[in-house]
């Protein structure tokens, strides 16, 4: 059987996007890991860059399917997916429209709230009609300020009062665009990983107090009761169905309050696929090797050579993993 060409699409860093440098580093790591896995699966990886010449590159390159190693604005806005759809190249993950909608935290929360799913009380900042100071004050303090479109907690800040809101948005200037201001919810952050709309597992993350974009430790599975994990998993599955994230892998971030109330922070339509990332680690804890995970994602898009048969790895015991400060998950 002739090996299929499978594209691995890596974005280019953009100076105007929040966290662009970090996204670029994650892209490179994801692209390298995916290319290695494709080779082990008997496929031919073709590295592509999501630059201005991507359309011409896609027309010149014979691809059977495509994996996206594009994170942040590059993959979240859905523009790359839209180009792949235009060129009729199958790719792993949700459609362009679904991706862009889920990546927009404001629209996603409106949809989740419509389906009676719990989300933080939120105000949009930076639009044509900014909320009044009274409306901001009604949120209660402290509050969390974050970009309306962003990932890996880049640009997320904990603010104490309304004056801090004005200072933070003014300091960001035009580069960050629109923001969301949400009531801060105390609790444990649990990132639920879903494969084709079904829960694969979950990871509890602990962030640095002085820099919310930095993860200090990760625990898989989270130290919660079985009933809590089941409830969180059901909530995540409802969220992905409401947003249409049932193709490929998705991640739903949930805060668990000490009184066992849950709040959905966001649903990530294109989480990173590095071996060291949350998705791959959760998959390993579920007994799924990295190569088997990629094979599952390519199911229905690519026929693998018959001699390749990735095996499920042995399920490891729960462990706390210390994360280097420079590496974001």
Image (cartoon, rainbow, N blue to C red):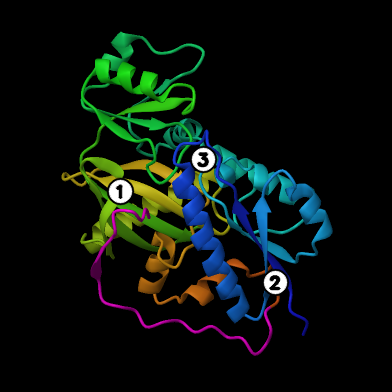
Please tell me whether mark 3 or mark 1 is closer to you in this view: 1
Q: Position of residue 20 (x, y in %)?
A: 49, 42
Residue 136 sits inside the magenta stretch: no
Picture disc at residue 214: 1
* Residue drawn at point x = 68 percent, y = 46 percent: 51
On the question of residue 275 being in view, the answer is: yes
Tell me the residue that label 2 is attached to: 302
Q: Position of residue 71 (x, y in %)?
A: 52, 49
Disc 1 crowd rating (10 Å Cα; few below 14, some 14-19, many 20+) is: many
Tell me the residue that label 3 is attached to: 103
Disc 3 crowd rating (10 Å Cα; few below 14, some 14-19, many 20+) is: many
Res 5 → quadrant: bottom right
* Residue drawn at point x = 16 percent, y = 44 percent: 259
Quadrant of the snapshot with the N terminus = bottom right
Residue lying at the far bottom in this picture: please name it. 307
Q: Position of residue 152 (x, y in %)?
A: 40, 46
Please tell me whether mark 2 or mark 1 is closer to you in this view: 1
Q: Nearer the viewer, residue 24 or 297?
A: 24
């Amino acid at each position: 059987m002739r090996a299929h060409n499978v594209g691995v699409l890596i974005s280019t860093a953009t100076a105007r996007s929040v966290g662009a440098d970090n996204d670029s580093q994650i892209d490179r790591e994801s692209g390298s890991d995916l290319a290695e896995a494709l080779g082990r699966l008997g496929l031919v990886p073709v590295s592509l860059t999501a630059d201005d010449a991507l359309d011409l590159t896609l027309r010149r390159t014979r691809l059977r399917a495509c994996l996206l190693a594009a994170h942040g604005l590059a993959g979240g806005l859905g523009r790359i997916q839209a180009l792949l759809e235009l060129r009729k190249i199958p790719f792993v993950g949700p459609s362009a429209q679904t991706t862009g909608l889920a990546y927009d935290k404001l629209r996603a929360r409106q949809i989740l709230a419509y389906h009676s799913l719990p989300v933080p009380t939120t105000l949009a900042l930076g639009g044509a009609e900014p909320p009044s100071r009274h409306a901001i004050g009604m949120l209660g303090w402290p509050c969390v300020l974050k970009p309306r479109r962003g990932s890996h907690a880049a640009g997320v800040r904990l603010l104490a009062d309304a004056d801090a809101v004005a200072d933070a948005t003014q300091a960001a200037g035009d580069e960050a665009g629109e923001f969301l201001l949400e009531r801060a919810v105390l609790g444990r952050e649990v990132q639920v990983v879903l494969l084709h709309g079904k829960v694969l597992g979950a990871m509890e993350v602990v962030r640095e107090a002085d820099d919310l974009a930095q993860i200090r430790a990760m625990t898989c599975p989270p130290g919660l009761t079985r009933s809590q994990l089941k409830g969180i998993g059901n909530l995540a599955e409802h969220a992905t169905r409401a947003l249409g994230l049932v193709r490929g892998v998705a991640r739903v971030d949930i805060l668990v309050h000490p009184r066992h109330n849950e709040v959905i922070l966001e649903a990530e339509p294109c989480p990173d696929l590095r071996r060291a990332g949350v998705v791959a680690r959760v998959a390993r804890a579920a007994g799924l090797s990295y190569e088997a995970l990629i094979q599952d994602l390519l199911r229905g898009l690519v026929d693998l050579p018959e001699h390749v048969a990735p095996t499920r790895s042995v399920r490891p015991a729960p462990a706390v993993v210390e994360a280097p400060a420079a590496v974001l998950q």
